[in-house]
Image (cartoon, grey):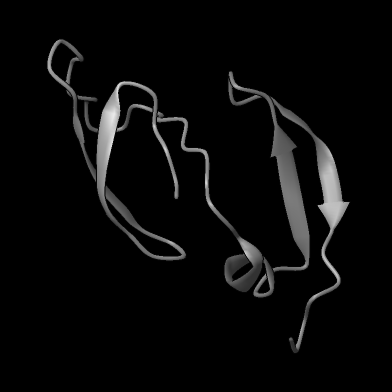
Amino acid sequence: NPSIDGHSVWFCSDEHITFSPNEGTPQPKVGERVFVTPAHIDPTMAMHDVAYVADTYGNVLGTWPVDLRGW
């Protein structure tokens, strides 16, 4: 299942997640980036031609071609 450090995941689908902060963890602000470790991403990736690879700071490190079109 997807996970977010310091938070509880309530519901997830391939492209959306509902979560809440655990006690003692502040609520994220609107627009703040939240690092989510997904369970799987294949249906979402199949809709794109390229994946952007980023570090935990949001810096784009490069791209990976996606060969799943029409999957």
Foreground residue among 39 and 65 = 39
* Closer to us: 60 or 15: 15
Label total for image: 0
> At 23% across and 42% down in the image, what residue appears?
19
Residue 40 spot, x, y in % from top left: 58, 58
Image x and y of residue 42, in percent:
65, 67
| Vertical comparison of 65 with 8: above or below | below
Displayed quadrant of residue 53: top right
Q: Residue furthest left?
A: 23
**Residue at image location 69% in from the left, 74% down from the top:** 46
Q: Is residue 9 left or right of residue 24?
A: right
Residue at left offset 24%, top offset 25%: 28
Q: Is residue 55 left or right of residue 36?
A: right
Instruction: Give whichever of 13, 44 is nearer the camera.
Output: 13
User: Measuring 46% from the left and 65% from the top, which residue is drawn there?
Assistant: 14
Q: Which x, y percent locates residue 61?
A: 79, 29
| Position of residue 39 measured from the top left corner of the image (x, y, whole percent) | 53, 52
Q: Is residue 8 left or right of residue 1?
A: left
